Image: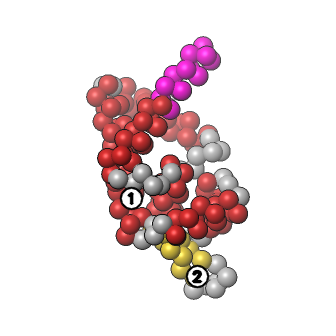
């Protein structure tokens, strides 16, 4: 049973990767890595986090996150604003380019939703959502 689940997860992971790549091609965001796009999405979800907050949400060390953020700043996707409360701290904001990339990246998510919705009936969709949320809630690697 575990090997079947492993194979199914691998196939589903490929579906996700293919949707991400299709979105990158479709939306002309080829110069960004999937990791960088994930950072942009997480910054938006966290509503202008500090590097510390972002690294905690991603489960990564601050120096690693800082390297990716510096690249995103260079690419014109993110900028930092010093905190009013603590001038030693900065908050990350998406530029208009970063916001546009997130909007275009939603195309990948929309494609997956459409695929799942076409293949499952309402009861199956409800079950799928329940199981997916259960897995996500128990995962240390994926933050809500």
- Give SS at disc 1: helix
Look at mark 1 in the image and give the residue it sits on. Answer: 101
- Tell me the distance, in whole angstroms, between the alpha carbons under discs 2 and 1: 25 Å
Instruction: Answer few, some or many: residues within 10 Å of disc 1's Cα (few below 14, many 20 plus, some between 14 and 19).
Output: many
The magenta region covers 1-13
The numbered disc on residue 83 is 2
Up the image or down, 89 lies above or below 75; here it is below
Q: Nearer the viewer, residue 134 or 14?
A: 14
Q: Is residue 10 a member of the stretch shown in magenta?
A: yes
Q: Residue at x 64, y 65 (%)?
A: 66
Q: Residues within 10 Å of mark 2 (few under 14, many from 20)?
A: few
Q: Name the outermost residue toward the top.
A: 1
In this rendering, the answer to whether 118 lies above or below 51 is above
Of the numbered discs 2 and 1, the one sitting upstream in the chain is 2
Residue at image position (42%, 29%) is: 127
Seen at 56% across and 64% down, the residue is 71
Q: Quadrant of residue 123?
A: top left
Q: Main structural element of the magenta stretch: helix, strand or loop?
A: helix
Residue 22 sits in which quadrant?
top left
Residue positioned most to the front: 31
Under tag 2, what secondary structure? loop
Quadrant location of the N terminus in the rendered image: top right
Asked if residue 40 is positioned above or below residue 140 in the image, the reply reads below
> Percent from the top left, x then y, of residue 8?
51, 22
Q: Position of residue 24 (x, y in %)?
A: 39, 48
């Amino acid at each position: 049973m575990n090997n079947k689940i492993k194979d199914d997860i691998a196939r589903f992971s490929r579906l996700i990767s293919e949707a991400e790549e299709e979105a990158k091609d479709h939306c002309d965001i080829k110069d960004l890595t999937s990791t960088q796009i994930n950072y942009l999405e997480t910054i938006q979800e966290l509503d202008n986090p500090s590097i510390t907050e972002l690294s905690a949400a991603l489960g990564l060390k601050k120096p690693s996150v800082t390297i990716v953020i510096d690249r995103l700043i260079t690419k014109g996707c993110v900028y930092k604003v010093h905190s009013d409360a603590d001038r030693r701290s900065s908050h990350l904001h998406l530029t208009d380019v970063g916001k546009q990339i997130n909007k275009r990246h939603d195309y990948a998510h929309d494609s997956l939703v459409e695929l799942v919705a076409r293949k499952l009936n309402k009861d199956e969709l409800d079950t799928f959502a329940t199981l997916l949320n259960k897995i996500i809630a128990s995962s240390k690697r994926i933050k809500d």
